[in-house]
Image: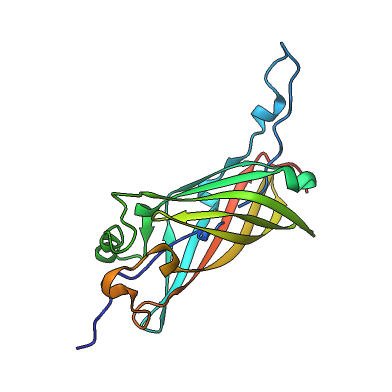
Amino acid sequence: MTKRLATPFSITALSVLSAALIVAAPAMAQTKPGAAPAAAAATAPKLLPPQSDIAFTFRQMGVPVEGHFKKFDAQMAFDPKNAAAGKVSLSIELGSATLGDAATDAELVKPEWFNVKKIPTATFQSTSIKTLGGGKFEVAGKLSIKGQARDVVVPVALTQAGGATTATGALAIKRLDFNIGEGEWKDTSMVANDVQVKFKLAFTGVAPL
């Protein structure tokens, strides 16, 4: 009999980083001794969860499947006019992964997939940021999922409107690089190895482009 996938793979950034996922925020302003806290403290970038999303797409027995992570956070210190000095980090709660089916989501947290009890979060930490022009950046860093770390490069596009800065991008990864889908689920004819992570992260408090 053909095995039916009861625990389809889902990931990140990630993305993607996922991922990715995942850049932009003003540098913290310096203050003189004895001065009041820097104005940057009041304008520190803050993630806007309702306007943000981290999604992933893979193929299960040849059929495209899309999922989302419901809980994640980003910390950034970045001036678009001085990208090389910027830093960004992202954390994703793997237990928040959903494919829209409660029974399937319950399988995703098990050791064969995300092993949430042992390592509940995936992380991305930038190592360099390169300006490409036109609001586009290239963010290099380390993506860690399920105890496996890989160097990735994430393309990011920034747009600004209504006081918010939105970072969007996509990252292609291999699930088996992160030991996601162990045992019989290593068979890529059932669950493809290729995963596409897409992100949209909205922030307040980002300096103008």
Residue drawn 70% across the image and 16% down it: 36
Kindly give the residue lying farthest to the left in the view shown: 1
Q: Is residue 62 left or right of residue 78?
A: left
Residue 164's spot in the image, x, y percent?
66, 46
Q: Quadrant of the N terminus?
A: bottom left
Residue drawn 69% across the image and 44% down it: 86
Q: Is residue 104 left or right of residue 57?
A: left
Kindly give the residue lying farthest to the bottom in the view shown: 1
Measured along the vertical axis of the image, is residue 2 above or below residue 143? below
Residue drawn 61% across the image and 46% down it: 88
Measured along the vertical axis of the image, is residue 131 above or below residue 75? below
Q: Is residue 127 left or right of residue 73?
A: right
Report the front residue among 16 and 167: 16
Residue drawn 74% across the image and 41% down it: 207
Colouring rule applied to residues: rainbow
Residue 174's spot in the image, x, y percent?
47, 70
Residue 208's spot in the image, x, y percent?
77, 45
Measured along the vertical axis of the image, is residue 156 above or below residue 187? above
Quadrant for residue 32, please give it: top right
Residue 161's spot in the image, x, y percent?
71, 51
Counting every numbered tag in the picture gives 0
